[in-house]
Image (cartoon, helix red, strand yellow):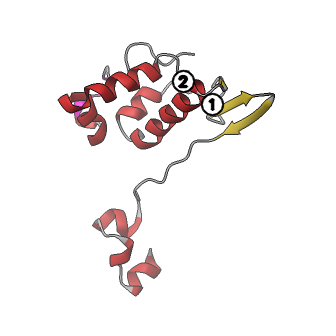
Amino acid sequence: MLSNLGKLFDLVVPEHKLDQYFARIRTAKTSIAARAMLEDVFVDFDDPDGNFKEQFQTTGFDSRFFELYLHAYFSRSGFEVDRSFPNPDFIVTRNGTKVCVEATTVNPSTSGVIAKDGKKIEGLGETELLEY
């Protein structure tokens, strides 16, 4: 199933739900080249889950951006890329060797005192750190 029913930057969610970095890349004059590159990568990008664009535009921007990066690297570096399954993110083959790749990113905390109070872990006291 191809995800690119329309372009990557065609909105599939209301503007108030957009990730701030997606919104900046989508509209900034300085991001014209980045948008063109991302659209080019997206042309042959399969979306087995069917929710790539929605997540790329909202809560999963960082991880979905990383998946596009990996797809660009693999598909342009001589790997055969298989994205026909929801998991793992990629099955790549080259020179007779097949490898499964699950793309993972480190994202800001969405729970606990760090997310609630917007503190950095270095700024937590001993009690707060133990609680976290």
Nearest the eye: 86 or 93: 93
Q: Which percent across, then down, holds residue 94? A: 73, 28
Reply above or below: 13 against 44.
below
Amino acid under label 2? Asp
Nearest the eye: 121 or 131: 121
Amino acid under label 1? Pro
Q: CA distance from mark 1 to mark 2?
A: 8 Å
Mark 2 crowdedness (10 Å alpha carbons): few <14, some 14-19, many ≥20: some
Q: Which percent across, then down, holds residue 69? A: 49, 35
Query: Which quarter of the rendered picture does the C terminus lie within?
Result: bottom left
Helix or strand or loop: what does disc 2 sit on? loop
Residue labelled with disc 2? 47
Q: Give, as a single range, the part of the protein colored magenta.
A: 11-15
Q: Say which mark, if any, is on residue 86.
A: 1
Nearest the eye: 131 or 89: 89
Q: Specify which label sits upstream in the sequence, 1 or 2.
A: 2
Is residue 13 rendered magenta in the image?
Answer: yes
The residue sitting at 38% across, 25% down in the picture is: 37
